[in-house]
Image: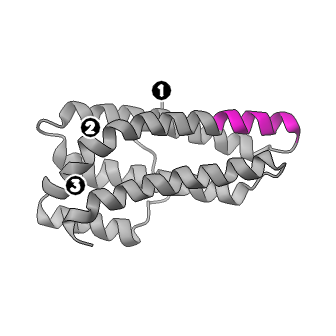
């Protein structure tokens, strides 16, 4: 991957997360709760938040991007808490009421992600292509390709 493709790779991860939630909702509408699909999607989203907060955001948060990055980190907290709520719901899913709660929580997460991505993709991600030192760009590309989030890591604003 070249540095010019970092923003595209990050956007692709957004699309994969949205698609995973969509697959979960389709199966839910069909009457089944596919905890594996939702679990894998939430894991991917947590990993994505990790790479942003640990690799992408620090070097770009010192200049013109400072306020935008702050808003993204705050948004990550709300997204993280919604994922935690989904984890709780999925572990107890079984009756139709749980299906309704899962549907509402998934749609809330999709809405949060849509609002978040409207800013992140056009404002933050261009800096991944043009505003990173070469070693940071390489670190980001390597993480996108093969990185793993450390066990137990939570985003900066996960707690209220």
Q: Give the residue number, with chain letter if any, for mark 1.
A: 160
Dot 2 or dot 1, earlier in sequence: 2
- Within 10 Å of disc 3 (Cα), the crowding (few <14, some 14-19, many 20+) is many
The residue lying at 11 percent from left, 38 percent from top is 63
Region rendered in magenta: 95-105
Magenta: main secondary structure: helix
Q: Which mark is residue 128?
A: 3
Q: Depth check: 119 or 45 in front?
A: 119
Residue 145 horizontal side relative to residue 35, left or right: left
Q: Secondary structure at mark 3?
A: helix
Q: Depth check: 153 or 70 in front?
A: 70
Quote the CA–CA distance across marks 2 and 1. Answer: 18 Å
The residue lying at 20 percent from left, 65 percent from top is 3
Residue 39 horizontal side relative to residue 34, left or right: left
Q: Secondary structure at mark 2?
A: helix
Q: Is residue 51 above or below residue 83?
A: below
Q: Which mark is residue 69?
A: 2
Quote the CA–CA distance across marks 1 and 3. Answer: 29 Å
- When asked about the image quadrant of residue 139, the answer is bottom left
Q: Are marks 1 and 3 in contact (CB under 8 Å)?
A: no
């Amino acid at each position: 991957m070249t540095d010019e493709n970092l923003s595209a790779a990050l956007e692709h991860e957004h699309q994969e997360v949205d698609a995973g939630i969509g697959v979960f909702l389709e199966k839910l509408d069909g009457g089944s709760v596919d905890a594996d699909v939702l679990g894998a999607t939430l894991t991917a989203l947590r990993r994505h938040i990790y790479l942003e907060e640990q690799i992408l955001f620090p070097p770009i948060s010192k200049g013109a991007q400072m306020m935008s990055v702050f808003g993204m980190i705050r948004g990550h907290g709300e997204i993280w808490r919604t994922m935690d709520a989904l984890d709780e719901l999925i572990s107890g899913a079984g009756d139709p009421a749980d299906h309704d709660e899962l549907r509402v929580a998934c749609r809330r997460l999709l809405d949060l992600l849509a609002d978040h991505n409207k800013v992140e993709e056009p404002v933050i991600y261009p800096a991944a292509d043009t505003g990173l030192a070469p070693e940071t760009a390489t670190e980001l590309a390597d993480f996108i390709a093969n990185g793993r989030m450390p066990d137990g890591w939570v985003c900066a604003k996960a707690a209220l």
